């Protein structure tokens, strides 16, 4: 169903710093590239937040009926320790420290990456290329850039000539940085660098004798530059120009800036129409950092085995927490925030469970189609998942009103509500209804049932003080009893 003909999306484009009406290059088809992980360590929650944001975007575009080719790469070589083309390759360094082969490092952490994303119910990308699998394409791209006069070779390494490029193009168009400012803020070369200028970046690096990961090239046995990998892989699978390029905010400069420059230098055109950047994840108001110890891994958060959080959290609760903030906002991960999200998540799941038991009426007292369009409007506005979730809680209120006989829905409207909630909650946000399989929820239900029976016995024995005490003390911990002709039920909202 081609819903995209009815729903008009606006995307915040980092290139222009404003929201723009989305128009794909080819109607009905979308090419989307997202920078994947460098697989030298376990994936961290900041990565999860970024990839989850684009997972929701991918899901929504598919829901609208677009045929989406989603490419997310694996960087398994070439990513040096810093952006000035110095230091060791991160994977090679890890292999040296652990005394194993670099490809063992790659395999271990690629598996970890996939396992974590599977735990959080990610949709796999259409294509997941690796840097080492595209060495030939990268060499060919370098040859084209050299031929066009925007790169030079020195002692077996090849560098992109930023100064020459900037004379006829705009190096800094994405990050809004000016080359003269970069020059002013850069320290002088120490006389040992092969670069003409400090701002130039490596397209190919000659491998030192001890460097394990190396490939033959026209210039030397070496390895490709980190920025080059994404240009080669994105254009191979999506074409010289494609619709959406995404990644973390930290990649805007220099990584994405260099991608634009490389494509302009090789193809004479800007590669991407819409650049999208997800913001960072903080932990208790501070940047996550391994060096300071202010960090927590996904498995530690899921198991509760950490020093930051009071309990373990289910994957969908964490996913729900992340979706309650715009992908462009800094998100602060706190125990209070997760506890509040957990409460809201299970309240929503309880409403969805109740939805299945509702009976249709002759007429509707709620405008479900208006609610449905409001939900689409939220996602159409730069994928505004927080507003969508607010609308879902509004639907939960409708469900409770219908259950209590305060409101009614016709058969057609009830069908629309069910299908729409399923689409928005499970298909688009990627949540899973874990309430039925959650052992803590089962134990809670069993314990409350025992208290309900004790309360009923107290009422039969006319011990109303005890009956009221059970009800009131449960209410203090947000467990509310509801008496009806059919018996007593409870809710945790």
Image (tube, grey):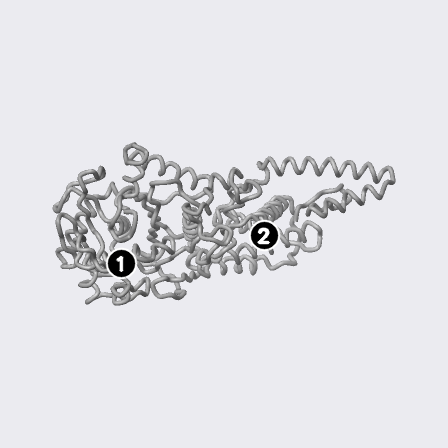
Q: Quadrant of residue 408?
A: bottom right
Q: Residue furthest front?
A: 190
Above/below status of 359 relative to 274 = above
Look at mark 2 in the image and give the residue it sits on: 412
Say which of 117 and 29 sits in front.
117
Say which of 15 and 399 sits in front.
15
What residue is at 46 percent from the left and 61 percent from the top? 381
Residue 185 placement, left or right of 2: left
Distance of label 2 from label 1 (alpha carbons): 50 Å
In the rendering, at what x and y percent does residue 470 appear?
77, 42
Point out the frontmost of discs 2 and 1: 1
In the rendering, at what x and y percent does residue 428 appear?
47, 49
Residue 385, label in figure: none
Counting every numbered tag in the picture gives: 2
Say which of 201 and 461 sits in front.
201
Residue 452 placement, left or right of 400: right
Residue 26 placement, left or right of 437: left
Instruction: Give the crowd class for mark 2: few <14, some 14-19, many >=20 residues within 10 Å.
Output: some
Residue 260, label in figure: 1
Say which of 392 and 102 sits in front.
102
């Amino acid at each position: 169903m081609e819903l995209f003909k009815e729903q008009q999306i606006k995307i915040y484009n980092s290139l222009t710093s404003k929201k723009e009406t989305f128009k794909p290059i080819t109607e009905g088809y979308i090419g989307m590239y997202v920078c994947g992980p460098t697989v030298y360590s376990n994936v961290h929650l900041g990565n999860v937040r970024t990839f989850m944001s684009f997972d929701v975007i991918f899901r929504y575009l598919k829901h609208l009926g677009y045929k989406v080719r989603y490419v997310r790469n694996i960087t398994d070589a070439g990513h040096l320790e810093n952006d000035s083309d110095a230091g060791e390759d991160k994977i090679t360094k890890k292999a040296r420290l652990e005394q194993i082969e670099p490809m063992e490092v790659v395999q271990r952490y690629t598996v970890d990456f996939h396992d974590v994303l599977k735990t959080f119910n990610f949709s796999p990308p259409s294509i997941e290329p690796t840097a080492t699998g595209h060495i030939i394409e990268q060499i060919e791209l370098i040859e084209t850039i050299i031929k066009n006069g925007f790169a030079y070779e020195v002692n077996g390494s090849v560098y992109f000539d930023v100064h020459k490029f900037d004379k006829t193009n705009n190096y800094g168009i994405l990050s809004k940085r000016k080359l003269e400012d970069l020059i002013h803020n850069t320290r002088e070369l120490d006389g040992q660098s092969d670069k003409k200028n400090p701002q130039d970046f490596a397209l190919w690096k000659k491998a030192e004798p001890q460097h394990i990961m190396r490939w033959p090239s026209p210039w030397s046995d070496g390895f490709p530059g980190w920025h080059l990998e994404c240009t080669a892989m994105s254009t191979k699978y999506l074409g010289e120009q494609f619709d959406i390029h995404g990644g973390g905010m930290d990649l805007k400069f220099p990584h994405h800036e260099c991608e634009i420059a490389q494509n302009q230098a090789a193809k004479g055109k800007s590669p991407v129409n819409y650049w999208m950047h997800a913001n960072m994840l903080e932990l208790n108001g501070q940047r996550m950092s391994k060096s300071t110890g202010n960090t927590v891994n996904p498995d530690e958060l899921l198991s509760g085995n950490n020093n930051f959080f009071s309990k373990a959290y289910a994957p969908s609760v964490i996913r729900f927490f992340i979706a309650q903030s715009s992908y462009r906002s800094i998100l602060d991960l706190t125990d209070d925030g997760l506890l509040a999200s957990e409460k809201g998540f299970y309240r929503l799941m309880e409403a969805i469970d109740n939805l299945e038991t509702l009976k249709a009426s002759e007429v509707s007292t709620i405008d479900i189609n208006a609610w449905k369009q409001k939900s689409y409007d939220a996602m159409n506005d730069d994928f505004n998942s927080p507003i969508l979730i607010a609308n879902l809680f509004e639907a939960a209120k409708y469900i409770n009103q219908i259950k209590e006989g305060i409101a009614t829905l016709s058969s057609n409207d009830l069908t629309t509500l069910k299908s729409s909630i399923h689409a928005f909650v499970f298909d688009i946000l990627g949540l899973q209804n874990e309430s039925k399989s959650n052992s803590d929820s089962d134990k809670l239900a069993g314990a409350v049932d025992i208290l309900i029976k004790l309360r009923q016995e107290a009422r039969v024995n006319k011990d109303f003080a005890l009956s009221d005490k059970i009800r009131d003390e449960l209410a203090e911990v947000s467990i509310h009893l509801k008496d009806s002709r059919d018996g007593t039920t409870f809710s945790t909202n």
